[in-house]
Amino acid sequence: MALQLKEPFTKCTGCKSEWIIPIKEGEEIFNFWWDKGYKIHIHITGDKAFEEYLNFVERAMKRNPRKNHRTTFHHVGLFDAEQAERAAKLGVEISANPYYLWALADKYSGTGMGAERAANMVALKEFTKRGVPVSLHSDFAMAPADPLLLAWVAANRIVASGKVMNPEERISVFDAMKGITITAARTFEKENEIGSIKVGKEATFTLLEQNPFKINPEKIKDIPVAGIVYKGRMILNKPKLIGGDKDIHGCIGTAGFKWCAKTNKCERPWELAKKEKFNNTAEAYNSFCQNK
């Protein structure tokens, strides 16, 4: 495991951490670019690494104060409220990968972190309630390059098993959508050019078929994309007939779903075959599902 944790790993025989860049060398590199006035991006996952690099920022601010330095920490898989408070006071910004929570919280609950720490992964409310700018990224190919999926995880904190992990740390839909639009643009210093619809900005944005602020937050990841506007040019997806992609049971064929009478719902055949241990064939599927 690469992540550095303040508390030891749990139920993980032989697990240990290593610094990708040793602390001494890391601070030397940080200070070199800090003193040249650059905006610095730092990739960290564990709370110990976050602590050490917050120390770098604090020492640099005392030695060579900079206004609006916008030092940005990426990923931030695990941290606590005290560290979030320090980040706010130091003018630090965050580009988080909420997919860590979806993909890893269940796994780390059993091995690595334990249930309490795993449930608190990517606890972004600690930042947003303190006014820290938070953008969302996928770290592709660690996670799908799907902005609405990232916003969905951050706003719901639903993990792969379907459980909700530490719901108190869900961020608002407003903050989640900012995380994939205007704050995302801010992370790479493009907020005056893109990220929101405003006179004088580049006309580049995505068109959605549903308003994410008016639907159940649990449906955000399923909002269809109607098209895009890229530098003023509109490109629309081909229109679909209402209900034309659904069968009589409401199953969406282009998404891979077929009706299963036995489970009484739409299923993806290959997923059901794996779960129920039958051959992934049409005949085996219809036999298991008792479809007529």
Image (tube, rainbow, N blue to C red):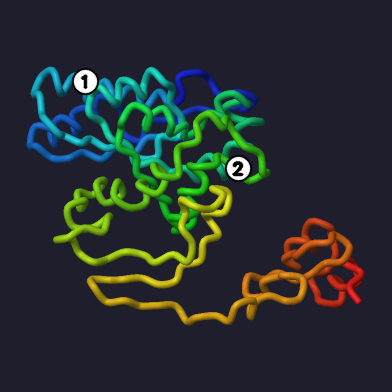
Quarter-wise, where is residue 260 in the image?
bottom right
Check disc 1 and give the amino acid type: Glu
Give the image location of residue 12, x and y in percent. 62, 28
Q: How far apart are marks 2 and 1 (CA)?
A: 34 Å
Q: How many numbered tags mark residues here?
A: 2
Q: Which residue lies under the disc numbered 1?
A: 58
In this image, 99 relative to 95: left or right? right
Q: What residue sits right under mark 2 in the picture?
A: 159
Mark 2 vs mark 1: in front = 2
- Residue sitting at x 21%, y 38%: 40
In this rendering, the answer to whether 67 lies above or below 242 is above
Q: Describe the element under mark 1 as helix, strand or loop.
A: helix
Identify whether 204 is placed above or below 151.
below
Provide residue 32's location: percent of width, then percent of height: 13, 33
Q: Name the residue located 63 percent from the left edge and 75 percent from the top edge.
A: 254
Q: What residue type is labelled 2?
A: Val
Residue 277 horizontal/vertical position (percent): 84, 59
